[in-house]
Amino acid sequence: MLRVSKTKTGYLQLGKTFTNVTKPFHFSKYRLHKKVKPLPSDEPYPGVSILKPLMGEDPHLVSNLETFFTMTYPEYELLFCIEDEKDPAIDVVNALKEKYPKLKQISILGVPQ
């Protein structure tokens, strides 16, 4: 229980029981920010597929999508799902494909190519 008392100068003083209240917060901070051990280098990483549904263009679309093009994971493919062939997001994806030609596995789904 939190103990609050007034000092001689009129200020409120929190008792020692306050630290018991904050202990779970310190524990959760430690647990949430615990470092993950990397996989041993002799085991190959599995390939992954990243599915990104897109619709329209927002102000940060280029920088958001660029993070997927610059990942350091060894083997992955990007699958962009776009419903309308006139969607401006297609131009953004194509521009990023030209900017990062090393990434070979890029597909645009839902639009005839």
Image (cartoon, rainbow, N blue to C red):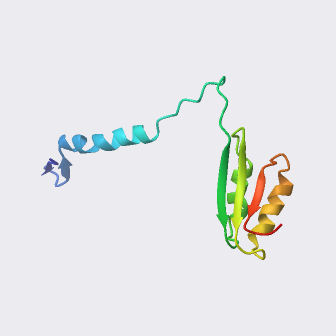
Residue drawn 73% across and 55% down? 66
Q: Is residue 51 left or right of residue 33?
A: right
Q: Quadrant of residue 62?
A: bottom right
> Which one is in front, 55 or 31?
55
Q: Is residue 28 above or below residue 66?
A: above
Number of marks drawn = 0
What x and y, as percent, mark residue 95?
Answer: 83, 61
Q: Quadrant of residue 39?
A: top right
Residue drawn 82% across and 56% down? 97
What x and y, as percent, mark residue 5?
Answer: 13, 50
What x and y, as percent, mark residue 19?
Answer: 24, 41
For the C terminus, the quadrant is bottom right
Residue 6 appears in view: no
> Which one is in front, 3 or 10?
3
Residue 71 appears in view: yes
Q: Is residue 72 above or below residue 99?
A: above
What x and y, as percent, mark residue 18?
Answer: 22, 44
Q: Is residue 6 left or right of residue 93?
A: left
> Which one is in front, 65 or 27?
65
Q: Quadrant of residue 59?
A: bottom right
> Which one is in front, 110 or 69?
110
